[in-house]
Image (cartoon, rainbow, N blue to C red):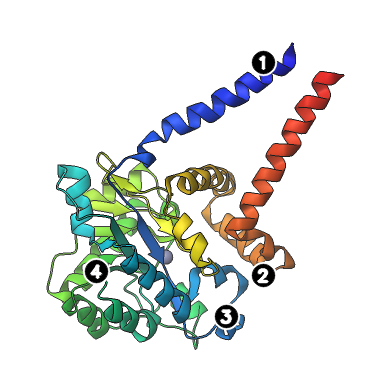
Amino acid sequence: MILPILFGLLAATVALFFWINRREFAAVRCPILLYHRFIRDEKDLERYPGTEAIFTITAERFDEQMRCLKEAGCSPVGLRQIVEFIVAGRPLPPRPVAVTVDDGWTSNIDIMLPILRKHGIQASFFVTTSAASWIYRKFEGLDGPLSRGQVALLRTEGHEIGSHSVTHPHLIELDDDAVRREFAESKRWLEEATGQPCPYLSIPGNFYDDRIMRIARECGYHAVFTANVGSARAGTSPWDIPRLIVEGNFSLAEFRANMRPMTICTRKLIFAVKKMPPRILGASRYMAIRERLFNSPLRALFIMRRLKMIALGMALLILAAIVLLSIR
Ligand SMILES: [Zn+2]
């Protein structure tokens, strides 16, 4: 008797999950890809501490991915187009896709930019404006901060520039005034560098809450891009525009799958679980533990395809346990 009930519950949960995410299957949606650092060669990866390997991609892979977008007839769109699409329903070109980059590394100019030029792809860069930020100090000698002139160059070449704060802090651990400074000063710095308004922001480390979004609005931002999983659709909140991280070790097949509704839904499930530890531990403690894990032999487990296998394995184990219990 118990078995059909449990199976029914399981089926209902799966159905509910897909119903909640039904908009991911909408005809018009825009996947927004999220990149970070670039390296010339696979062997350069060894020099980066484990935690960051996922956020570092080789020139060859990125080139292959951009070619793939072009061959698939995708139209690269910018931040402004996305915001006008979700807020006002302004139509996007066919097969829209956005390429975004967080942090503001020199490798974006040295390695990424020539590839964007080669394929004629417009991208958007969210820049952390202080050269003294911990993220730049961490990779000193490997990669560094974009200069004002380099940010200006990106804008001149038609790319969009957004803010990624001044120092890349865990915003939720700062008081209102400190958050305001992070948002206002980075905005001013970027507007001076490009000579254009800077109405868009992306959240460092994806640590935010309603208070952070309120301050962003007060500082004059019109939309905020997060690292939550999903694609931009009509009705997406401009204060939480989700993106799709492209992990450095994605194969071309995984890159393509990453943009499909079914994969996005699976990733959402994994992401929902991944969001729990920082909520329980707090941002700083979570990041410290994460860093230690990623630098241990366990880091091999934290690759998307392995996480999927682990999730599947656990689901099967639970199912087996349910079956065994009900037989008894
Ligand atoms: Zn960042």
Task: Residue 161: give its label.
Answer: 4
Cα–Cα gap, marks 4 and 1: 53 Å
Cβ–Cβ under 8 Å for marks 3 and 1: no
Which part of the image, by quadrant, shows the C terminus?
top right
Cα–Cα gap, marks 2 and 3: 13 Å
The residue closer to the viewer here, 208 or 2, is 2
Tell me which label, 3 or 4, sits earlier in the chain. 3
Residue 170, can we see it? no
Q: Residues within 10 Å of mark 4 (few under 14, many from 20)?
A: many
- Of circles 4 and 1, the one toward us is 1
Q: Is mark 1 within 8 Å of ligand 1?
A: no
- Horizontal and vertical percent for residue 165? 33, 64
Determine which residue is flagged by label 3.
45
Q: Amino acid at mark 1?
A: Ile
Farthest-out residue, top: 1
Tell me which label, 2 or 1, sits earlier in the chain. 1
- Of circles 2 and 3, the one toward us is 3
Q: Quadrant of residue 20?
A: top left
Residue 179, can we see it? yes
Cα–Cα gap, marks 3 and 4: 27 Å
Q: Residues within 10 Å of mark 2 (few under 14, many from 20)?
A: some
Q: Is mark 4 within 8 Å of ligand 1?
A: no
Of helix, strand and loop, which one carries label 4?
strand
Q: Residue at x 41, y 54 (%)?
A: 259
- Horizontal and vertical percent for residue 133? 41, 74
Q: Amino acid at mark 2?
A: Asn
Task: Residue 295: give its label.
Answer: 2
